Amino acid sequence: MDRRPSSRKNVKKKDAPNKNESFKGSFKPKKRFIPKKKKNQEGSDEGGVRLNKYIARAGLASRREADELIKTGIVQVNGKVVQEMGYKVQPTDVVRFDGREIKAEKKVYVLLNKPKGFITTTQDEKGRKTVMDLVSNASPYRIYPVGRLDRPTTGVLLLTNDGDMAKKLTHPKHNVKKIYHVTLDKNLSKGDFHSVLEGIELDEGIAMVDKISYIDGKKKNEIGLEIHIGWNRVIRRIFAEIGYEVIKLDRVYFAGLTKKGVKRGHWKILTEQEINYLKML
């Protein structure tokens, strides 16, 4: 006769289950009580969009900036001022910002082959040319650059109204791959080549590159450089630290995007395939 005490214990546990018990075989745990989420004053929490995200999608501000704007009381939903950070907007809601109705926009992704002489910003107080002058008719929505290319730097630049995507592509933890064609004022020596590969000390720390190579068929002053860190003017500063001047800097690859088929100063709308690739990064 099987008198194993475990059978009695199992019966006991069935009568008074332990919340930490792991059920096996035919035993099924009782459904846990989950408190319902608090509903908004204007409709259910189900399927809504957070108010700060809705404002960001409308192209008015980043999510963080939207939080500050909500606090000021200039945002209304269905005629009522909303200052609740977690408020969720429902599809039938009418949202007004400073008295003006706003709507979440379709997400747009524009690739620009940036020419030199343009500043990577949405506006310039000194009246200098910005990249926005080149994409003014690319989208009916407000788009903005993802990251920066300094004024003399050329090449691949992404512009979008997708704040989440912009944040992901510029955050250091995602290690977004960037490749540059670097032209120096003189040939890069083998010793300095290896110094760059081993890391150059800058104010922020050791600047590490992922790959460096001489470009086939070119003089030794033309270098291919793969890097993921996004410090300000980092490539120019790396070479300046070892006695070189960067006379041309062209970004040929950014997060899987290239300038293939896009002339300098021109732009294109990303394909669905390119957008999906960015989302998978």
Image (tube, grey):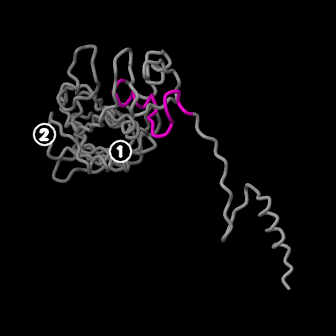
Residue at 45% from the left image edge and 36% from the top image edge: 48
**Gap in angstroms between the C-alphas marked 2 and 1:** 24 Å
Q: Callout 1, which amino acid? A: Ile
| Residue 56 covered by magenta stretch | yes
| Rendered-image quadrant of the N terminus | bottom right
| Residue 139 covered by magenta stretch | no
Q: Which residue is mark 2?
A: 263
- Vertical side of 44 occupied by 13: above or below: below
- Name the element at disc 1: strand
- Name the element at disc 2: loop
Q: Callout 2, which amino acid? A: Lys
Q: Position of residue 75 (x, y in %)?
A: 43, 19
Q: Which residues are magenta?
A: 39-60
Q: Looking at the rendering, which quadrant does residue 92 occupy?
A: top left
Residue at 67% from the left image edge and 68% from the top image edge: 24
Callout 1: few (<14), some (14-19), or many (20+) C-alpha neighbours within 10 Å? some
* N-terminal-most mark, 2 or 1: 1
Residue at 53% from the left image edge and 27% from the top image edge: 41
